Amino acid sequence: MTSGSSAGSRPDAAGGPGRLDSLTSWDADWSGLRVVVAGLGLSGFSAADTLAELGAHVVVVDSQDSADARGKADTLKIVGVHEVLLGPDAPLRLPDVGGAPADVVVTSPGWRPDQPLLAAAAAAGIPIWSDIELAWRVRRRAGRSTADWLVVTGTNGKTTTVGMAESMLLAAGQRAIACGNLGTPILDVIRNPEDWDTIVVELSSFQLHWTHHIEPAASVVLNVAEDHVDWHGSFEAYCADKAKIYEHTRVACIFSEEQPLTMRMVEGADVQEGCRAVSFTTDAPGRSMVGVVEGMLVDRAFLENRAHQALELGHLEDLGPLAPRHQVANALAAAALVRSIGVSPEAVRDGLRAYQPGEHRIQPVAKANDVLWINDSKATNPHAADASLAAFTDVVWIAGGLSKGVAYDDLVARHADRLRAVILLGADPSELEGALKRHAPDLPVLQTAVRETGNEHSDGQQAMVTAVREAHAVARPGDVVLMAPAAASMDQFTSYADRGNAFIDAVARLMEDLGLGS
């Protein structure tokens, strides 16, 4: 961890030397800036709307030509966007803006670097920004207070951690909001008439890839495991993008004591003078750490006499009836973030008690005949499923989906002894099925028997009904039926939430059909 200047270098716009360097507040001269916005999802729409309000000359591109996309396009044209190009051919080239090359491209996070439009921009030397980069540049505005940023990334746990941090800040009486990757677009937060004291920002590796300079008060990488290799090209490239979150941090870089890779990311970061390295652990903490002692969450980082004392931040019971280890780690990371900017231990405790976990994250949905049914559809990769499986002893596991190029051998080998049976989801579960054959050859593995045919996706709803019925047939008293797919959902469902809701509905139908209480 090295200290350096907070003024990162930025490429010049095609419209003139230093034009982009001057765009560091809402009140800068954005008029006439030629911008291509790639994508018409939540973040792309928000970016285009913001840029139009700033007076930029904006062209939006999206591969969809649906009724929803056309409706969004009409709205953007009303607010001043110059042109919206829709359809599968639209992203195959980089359009001009008003008859001249773009000065900058603002991309939606899902767009890969090798996508033709982005590749053309890179080849032409045109800067590519995330919505986060744009939000950082417009965060300051005359007559408004400028909020601190607390930023969070990691393979898993991001949404939970930003939610916990938001709850702690609200308990402290701050005007605070969580936003970013899966929540409210950050530019909608920046443009909100309400002033914020602190913004807690969830950042994906995709967003970080296109983010060049932010200066958060505190930053954290919760954990890192193999994920999105298909997008980044390699695990090393994925880690490099995650590590960017620590650059230029002002107060505290927070990392996992249990994942040395996150510590190495901090060590390699160029931070501002006086920034500290603080770790979290689910075991007893040392100096400059937060951790757990005899069921208490404690702080040995943000107090004067941290060599000999610790502050109580709360108890494991404050996390609710289920407090698996990874949830404790998320709570500690959130506590470290808010403690770094002066939030009291009492507000940390009150925030944890007030926090309501989101759906589809270790969510109990039914218990009958001493069998507990858990929805963890948010476990979209092996690392997340590993944390879920580790929380229980005897598991009937519903798993499978779109694997995103990851391997399952380590996951299956680690948890084979706790598995009682596996029910496979997914249009092509062969990767997971192969790992089960190699590392748990005697384990019952059941198929949902609903598969992809031709160009039409399989019926995910029916597949889930079948999976739940199969799980019921093999579950015994004391078992947990855990739907933690270790894979993305898009082969059979529209989203992880759609998959989770399908599980909840299928379990509810099972309970009703069998006359069982939930």
Image: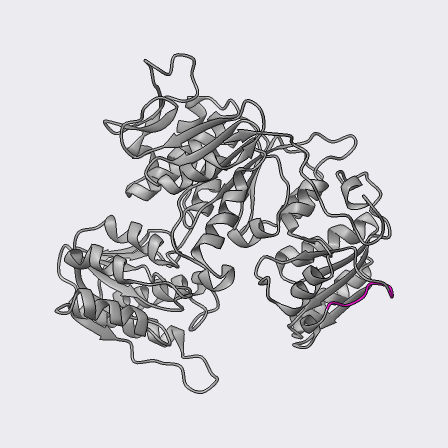
Residue 223: x and y, percent?
39, 45
Given residues 257 and 362, the one toward you in this image is 257
Q: Is residue 312 above or below residue 261?
A: above
Q: Residue at x 17, y 56 (%)?
A: 418
Q: Report the side of 379 relative to 116 (left or right).
A: left
Residue 321 in sight:
yes
Image quarter in which the C terminus is found: bottom left
Magenta: main secondary structure equals loop
* Residue range of the region highlighted in magenta in the rendering: 94-99
Q: Residue 262: say if magenta.
A: no
Is 305 above or below relative to 72?
above
Residue found at the far bottom of this picture: 454
Residue 320, given in percent of the width and then of the height, sits at 32, 39
Give 321 or 16, whichever is nearer the viewer.
16
Asked which quadrant contains residue 401, the reply is bottom left
Residue drawn at (51%, 52%), measured in percent from left and top?
A: 205
Q: Is residue 236 left or right of residue 514?
A: right
Q: Which x, y percent locates residue 420?
A: 16, 62
Identity of the residue drawn at 74% across and 50% down: 50
Spot occupied by residue 390 in the image (x, y as percentages of width and height): 24, 49
**Residue situated in front as seen by the camera: 379 or 376:** 379
